[in-house]
Structure formats: structure tokens, C-alpha cells
Image: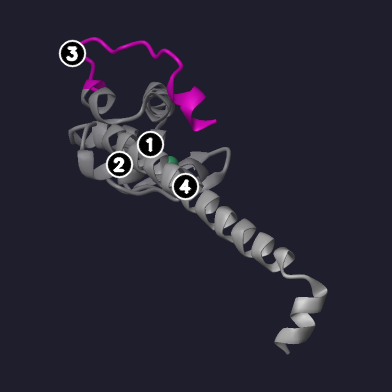
Amino acid sequence: MLDSINCQPVKQPCDDDAMHPYFAILTPYTYRLLSEQFRSSANTVVADTGIVNSHEGQLVVGNEACCCRFYNTLRLPCRHILSLRQDKGLPVYDEALVPKRWKRSTWRQASIVHGRDTATATVSIMQSRTQVATVLSAARSISRNQQWQMK
Ligand SMILES: [Zn+2]
């Protein structure tokens, strides 16, 4: 499922877009989520105290963390963090804000490792099935009489 989500085309940002560096490191799916938050950050007002009134209630926002649902679920910069950073003149882009699991590099590695593991697992399952089949057929070839004599 993740494969099909990540393969959907995403509009590449303009070079001067503050979000451009994120496009280079994030999976397309993650970048889409983050750009939506960035667009919404324009309409988000965070007080100097770091408090924001949202439909989720009163939220406490920091430069790198927030207590909103989006941040707590995905650990990606939400509209509140992005708004606060812009108000404070901090860069919108900071690689440290993005967990490894959302990066293209991690996704690529995971796909390769997963592919190899699947192949290895399949071979070992096939090998163990063959061994079981061999043992079973050997056991069947011994007649009941022979089994009796062996006791
Ligand atoms: Zn938030």
C-alpha cells in the first residue's frame, strides 16, 4: 500500500519555495502531508507565549514540537510549528525536524532489505518444506511390520 502511495505524482516545488529542501529528502507521500501543513500555517496564529487556539483546543507549541494530533501521530512539523518558526524568523526547513522513517533514503533501504529478506525467507521455507517431505516419505517407506521389528 505504501508503494502505491509513494508512487503518486507530486507537484515539485519552485526553487525559491521554503519547502523545497524537504522535497529532496522526504518520500512523496510525506512531502504532500508536510506541504499541506505549510499552506495551512499561513492561516495559523500562534501567540508569543507559544499557545494556539485550534479546533483541538488550546495547544502548546514549540520550535520543534507541538501537542496537536498531527504532530503526535506523525512527528512531522505541523502547521503550528511551521507558523511559529516563521514568526520567529527561524528557517522552515530543518532536517532534524523530520524522523528518519519519513526520508526517501530510509524508504529506499527498507524496500531493498525487505525484498532480500522476503527472498531469503521464501528459500528457507521451501528448504524446510523439502526436508519435512523427505522425512515424511522416509517414515512412510517403513512398513508397519518393519516399525514393529525395530522396537
Ligand atoms: Zn501542531
Q: What predominant SS class does the magenta segment belong to?
A: loop
Find the distance from the CA under tag 1 to the CA under tag 2: 19 Å
Tag 4 residue: 123
Q: How crowded is mark 2: few (under 14 residues within 10 Å), some or many (20 or more)?
A: some
Residue type at tag 1: Ser
Image height of 11 relative to 127, above or below: above
Give, as a single range, the part of the protein colored magenta. Answer: 1-20
Can you give x and y, in whole percent of width and height, for residue 78 in the image?
A: 40, 37
Can you give x and y, in whole percent of width and height, for residue 22 in the image?
A: 26, 28
Tag 3 residue: 16
Q: Nearer the viewer, residue 39 or 52?
A: 39
Residue type at tag 3: Asp
Residue occupying image coordinates x 23% and y 24%? 24
Can you give x and y, in whole percent of width and height, for residue 99 in the image?
A: 32, 45
Of tags 1 and 2, the one toward the viewer is 1
Tag 2 residue: 98
Going from N to C along the chain, the mark reached first, 2 or 4, is: 2
Residue occupying image coordinates x 54% and y 49%? 126
Find the distance from the CA under tag 2 to the CA under tag 4: 37 Å
1 and 3 marks in contact (CB < 8 Å): no
* SS state under label 4: helix
Tag 1 residue: 111
Image height of 146 relative to 65, above or below: below
Of tags 4 and 3, the one toward the viewer is 4
Find the distance from the CA under tag 4 to the CA under tag 3: 50 Å
Find the distance from the CA under tag 4 to the CA under tag 1: 18 Å
